Image: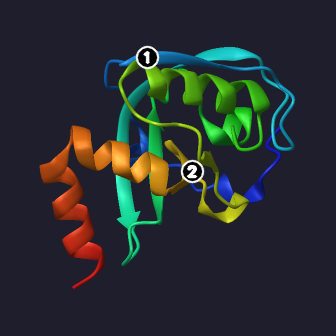
Amino acid sequence: MLLNDMHTNWNAADDDKRAGIAVLHTSGDGYWSRHVRGIRITELRVSYINEDARFGELCVHFNTDDWMPPKHGLIYSDRQFEAELGAFLATIGLDGEDVGYSEQGMQGDNYVSCDVGSKFLASWKAKYPEKFAEVFSACNE
């Protein structure tokens, strides 16, 4: 049963079949889904950084063979997924302390949208300075 009718317009452009960089799990306790499963994460992409680098958006892309919002609902608000994301970020040298779900309307068909704060952004900048500069510049021209 589709719990979020915003995600009924699935098309081939929404498919993400890339290999996973990690597997995160849902516990089925979210507002929008009761599915319990492992989901391959295909990419972490910072898509927005505000002018003082204290707020941004992290898009956590997932393989759509594992999770399709029209079939499974939204991952948004699942506590296990959010906790595992924070732990995964720590294993790759990123601060996940101020990473949490953004609002429901920001969730994508093939990614989970998360708000990030200055701790995450500082760690992202230290690890990926070129990517940080590119996104920061694009968002703050």
Q: Quadrant of the N terminus?
A: top right
Q: Which residue is mark 2?
A: 114
The C terminus lies in quadrant: bottom left
Residue 61 versus residue 2: which sits nearer the camera?
Answer: 61
* Residue 36 in picture, x, y percent from top left: 76, 17
Q: Position of residue 62 (x, y in %)?
A: 47, 32
- Where is mark 1, residue-wise? 22
What secondary structure is found at the residue carrying circle 2? strand
**Quarter location, residue 22:** top left
| Whole-percent x, y for residue 8 in the image | 66, 53
Inspect this view and state whether residue 54 appears. Answer: yes
Q: What secondary structure is found at the residue carrying circle 1?
A: strand
Figure coloring: rainbow
Residue at image coords 76%, 57%: 5
Label 1 Cα crowd, 10 Å radius (few <14 / some 14-19 / many 20+): some
Q: Is residue 97 left or right of residue 18?
A: right
Quick check: 45 above or below 28?
A: below
For marks 1 and 2 on the same chain, the one whose residue lies earlier in the sequence = 1
Residue pictured at 20% horizontal, 43% vertical:
128
Instruction: Return the x and y of residue 84 as percentages of the image width and height.
Output: 62, 22
Q: Residue furthest bottom?
A: 141
> Disc 1 vs disc 2: Cβ atoms closer than 8 Å?
no
Which three-letter amino acid code belongs to the residue tagged 1? Ala
Q: Residues within 10 Å of mark 2 (few under 14, many from 20)?
A: many
Q: Would you say 84 lies left or right of 80 here?
A: left
- Mark number for residue 80? none
What whole-number distance in Å separates the C-alpha atoms at marks 1 and 2? 17 Å
Q: Amino acid at mark 2?
A: Cys
State the image quarter where residue 44 is shown.
top left
**Residue 45 visible, this orientation:** no
